Amino acid sequence: MKHKILFVDDEDNILKALKRLLRKSHYETFYENNGKSALDCMKENEISVLVTDMRMPKMNGVELIIEANKISPITIKTILSGYSDINDIMTAINSGHVHNYITKPWNESELIISLMNATELYEKRISEKNLINELNDKNEELNTLNTNLEKLVKARTWELQASNKILNAIIEGEAQSEIMNKIAELISKLAGNKEVGIHEAGTQELFGAELF
């Protein structure tokens, strides 16, 4: 898959430097200079990795990531910031909001490796999400099968009870009229407890239908 990476920094020179570094990469890259436009970008695109500066006006990096999690929880979030923000970054990492951080000024090779690792992790999250969806679908199928099986068991149970009732009447030597009345009574249940005649349903329909 072709990964989409979103960079957010309020300094244009930082965004320009990132563009130069990644202009020949196989990633599709986006560059925004504020949190609001970054969130709009995430709403319109399936972003694999979000890389944001920590200190920005109106919405800082952690605030942006918290809002980004509401849009795409599986997107990998990384902070790109200076050493002076390390304590805040580590707090964000420990809270689970941030996956990793890259310090400014960055080492180009380390930045590329960090992006590769982040996209690999994103692919794993996608696989896990697909697996969970597949398991949920299978669970729904199983529930449907169980429901249908329960109905089938009830129908077969009624069929057996109905057959035994008629058979016992024959064995006990009941009059033919009484036996026919029993059959009519069972057929009536099939018809929704309405009075029906023998000619309206045969015993094959009676014993092959669902009664409960």
Image (tube, rainbow, N blue to C red):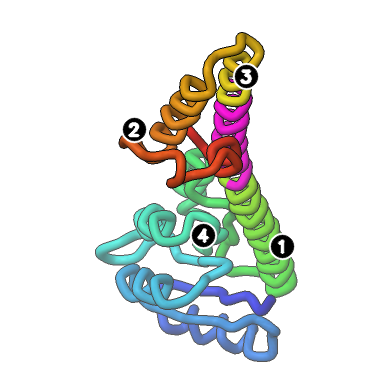
> Callout 2: few (<14), some (14-19), or many (20+) C-alpha neighbours within 10 Å?
few
Residue under circle 3? 164
Callout 1 touching callout 2 (CB < 8 Å): no
Cα–Cα span, label 4 and label 2: 71 Å
Residue positioned 52% across, 38% down in the render: 210
Residue under circle 1? 120
Q: Secondary structure at mark 3?
A: helix
Q: Amino acid at mark 3?
A: Asn
Question: What's drawn in magenta, residue-wise?
Answer: 141-161
Q: Amino acid at mark 2?
A: Asn
Quadrant including the N terminus: bottom right
Q: Position of residue 75 (x, y in %)?
A: 54, 61
Residue 87's place in the image compared with 166, above or below, is below
Q: Position of residue 144 (x, y in %)?
A: 56, 43
Residue positioned 43% across, 55% down in the render: 69
Q: Nearer the viewer, mark 3 or mark 4?
A: 3
Q: Position of residue 211 (x, y in %)?
A: 48, 33
**Magenta segment includes 152:** yes
Left of 38 or right of it: where is 203? right
Marking on residue 79 = 4
> Callout 3: few (<14), some (14-19), or many (20+) C-alpha neighbours within 10 Å?
few
Q: Secondary structure at mark 1?
A: helix
Question: Which is nearer the N-term, disc 4 or disc 1?
Answer: 4
Residue under circle 2? 193
Q: Nearer the viewer, mark 4 or mark 2?
A: 2
> Callout 4: few (<14), some (14-19), or many (20+) C-alpha neighbours within 10 Å?
many
Residue 205's place in the image compared with 176, above or below, is below
Cα–Cα span, label 1 and label 2: 64 Å
Callout 2 touching callout 3 (CB < 8 Å): no
